[in-house]
Amino acid sequence: MSVTRDEQSLKQEIARLESELYTARNQLSSFSTSAAEIFPTDALPTEHKDNHGGEEIPDKRLEFNVTQIPPHPLLHLTDTALPLGSFAFSSGLESYLAHHKAAHNTKLDTLPNFLQLSLTSLAATSLPYLINAYKSPARLEDLDDTLDACTLCPVAKRASISQGRALITVWEKALRAETTASAAKDVMNAFCASLKSPSSGKRGDRVEMNGHFPLIYALVCCAQGLTLHETAYTFLFNHAKAVASAAVRASVLGPYAAQGVLGSKWLRAEIETAMKREWERSVEDAAQGVPVLDVWIGRHELLYSRIFNS
């Protein structure tokens, strides 16, 4: 009888130690770029329960831990209700549909095909600027001026500035008061003040102020406490959501099919691949990866009829 009790106690002790080991590994994974490098998913412990009818041992993963809650600003800045004006833009999709022969594309393939090109283009042209702005907030004005000069398509340039200034308005009216002091917050406040000055749009001894969206998004995310990886990923994912929304309104596919694309492993892989490809690229090497996309976006204003601003 004592042997049975000792065996049961030993099993419970093993289960408890496994649970504590998992908690320690989970804490360690927060300092790693990839939790999968520390332990594979199939090695995660399941809920512990003695096979001989013993008392169930609680899994520490199920206990309340505030550090396991996603950052509140992360959920807020990825909300589709954020008033950035992206609802009015198709990111070139409407022009792509008008210039692309339907015979070469079924409706089910249209969104993935275009989204792959659009993400490649956005990552190549904007991600190096976003990453540099996040790392060096003090360079915001110089990066803004450089990005403005390197954005050759006037339609894309107007859309970027429009969304950037919309985010500046959100920052001033809703986010700034709840943000703790930081270098990014100070730079954002100074940039907003300079943008409102009478000389902000004039060339002179100072840099021209524009407020391009990738740079403003980087500074807002930095000031809100998001990591660089979260900032870059949500920037690309928000773009994918905007394109998917435009595809639904353009009757390319239905809302459920669009959500299927957004929730797919394929989209996650595309975003991660784009991030990895552009992560170490310098601003000087940033360039349009899909030149024809500038043509589609630029010719949007020439369409006979259109439902989007650009």
Image: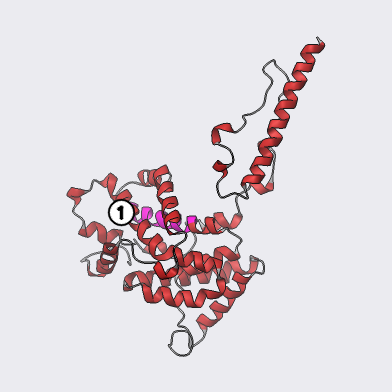
Extreme residue toward the right, this view: 2
Q: Quadrant of the C terminus?
A: bottom left
Q: Is residue 264 visible?
A: no
Give the x, y percent position of residue 119. 37, 56
Give the x, y percent position of residue 1. 80, 9
User: What's the residue at 56%, 81% (across, down)?
Assistant: 193
Give the answer, above or below, for where 274 lies relative to 64.
Answer: below
Is residue 236 inside the magenta stretch? Answer: yes
Image quadrant assignment for residue 151: bottom left
User: What's the residue at 73%, 19% (across, down)?
Assistant: 54
Circle 1 SS class: helix
- Crowding at label 1, few (<14), some or many (≥20) Cα neighbours within 10 Å? some
Disc 1 marks which amino acid? Phe
- Count of all numbered marks drawn on residues in the image: 1
Is residue 271 inside the magenta stretch? Answer: no
Left or right of 89? Residue 54 is right
Overall secondary structure of the magenta section: helix
Extreme residue toward the bottom, this view: 204
Left or right of 143? Residue 178 is right
Q: Which residues are magenta?
A: 233-250
Left or right of 201? Residue 247 is left
The residue indicated by pointer 1 is 114
Image quadrant assignment for residue 192: bottom right
> Who is closer to the viewer here, 90 or 116?
116
Image quadrant assignment for residue 24: top right
Give the answer, above or below, for where 296 lies relative to 114.
Answer: below
Give the answer, above or below, for where 202 lies relative to 216.
Answer: below
User: What's the residue at 69%, 44% (across, down)?
Assistant: 65
Extreme residue toward the top, this view: 1
User: What's the residue at 54%, 78% (across, down)?
Assistant: 191
Give the x, y percent position of residue 219. 54, 68
